[in-house]
Image: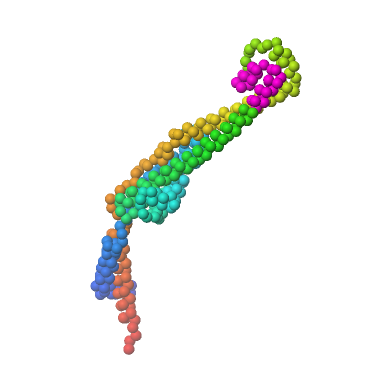
Amino acid sequence: MEETIELRELIETVWKGKWIIAGLTALCVFIAAIVSWSVLPEEYESKATVQVASEVQDAGIMASYVAAEFTPVIFTQRIKNPTLMDEALEEAGIKEKFDVERLSVNTQANTNLVELKYTAFSPEVAQQELTIFIQKTKERMNVSVKSTLDELEKTYTSESKHLSGEIEALVGKYNEKIATNGLPEILIMQTLIGSQIITPVTEEQMNALSRVDGTLHNELMQMQAQIASKSAEYRKVLDKYQSVKTGLDSFRPDPFIRQIVDPTLPERPFAPSKSLNVAIAMTIGLLAGVGIVVFREYWKNSAPVK
């Protein structure tokens, strides 16, 4: 019974102060409306979804370098790089700095999809700048792979020249050894093509062959082996060089980065949420009003009797 009386008194106290509560609530709502509609700038959010290839079907030498660069993680790190994005804005003639807080990047687990959200103070700017950032990121990833392939091309070119010089020197020594000992010149051809050739030889050449001892034979066999080994190594380097060269000529980033959803043009503001702000202000006004009314009644009733 006592609790019922206290609840009744509380309701009566609130009812007595209804105009205070209503006035404070209206004031909070009015302030929230003014701030939301007139003070806070509207923000628009452009969204895009990008697919970054994590696997490369090509089995060439460039596959490992492409696979290492074109991943969702690398894409995320590059598009959130302030220096790179500032450069992109400057190239586009936009006089503002990149704010990473306005860019949201979400990589979906177990997929190669990257979801992007970018906010700006107008829908056109949000769409334009998000498009610029994606394009710049693709270009930088393209440049990164091409730079690596350029270095590989230079390395293989230098290595092939070095091997070519070594083979030339070995063949020169071998030819000199053949000529000095009066051996058939057909041995030179056999060494170069790596197979046996049957051809008639002169009596003088036969006599020269009969004078070949174990030491000379071993020297010739070692030279042939060295020439064959260096030639095989040279062919491998040429194959790698050709693979890199082909990759450089045909490389494009588009197959590895695809825009599944192009940057959208927002139709309505993303923030501020005006209705939510008004609702929050109304709640705060009601609670504050009730608190003031109850505290006023308590203060009046607890005053000492004179």
What residue lies at 39% left-to-right and 44% top-to-bottom? 135
Residue 66 x/y as whole percent: 48, 39
What residue lies at 39% left-to-right and 55% top-to-bottom? 97
Q: Is residue 28 magenta?
A: no
Magenta extent: 170-195
Nearest the viewer among 162 and 135 is: 162
Above or below, comparing residue 155 to residue 28 in the picture: above
Nearest the viewer among 30 and 86 is: 86
Q: Viewed as shown, does residue 182 lie left or right of 168?
A: right
The image's colour scheme reads rainbow
Nearest the viewer among 18 and 235 is: 235
Residue 204 x/y as whole percent: 71, 12
Residue 240 x/y as whole percent: 53, 32
Dominant SS type (magenta): helix
Q: Viewed as shown, does residue 82 lie left or right of 276?
A: right
- Residue reaching furthest left? 19
Q: Viewed as shown, does residue 235 lie left or right of 204?
A: left
Instruction: Tell me if residue 289 can be seen.
Output: yes
Residue 83 x/y as whole percent: 44, 52
Instruction: Tell me if residue 117 can be seen.
Output: no
Q: Viewed as shown, does residue 221 lie left or right of 294?
A: right
Above or below, comparing residue 235 to residue 281 in the picture: above
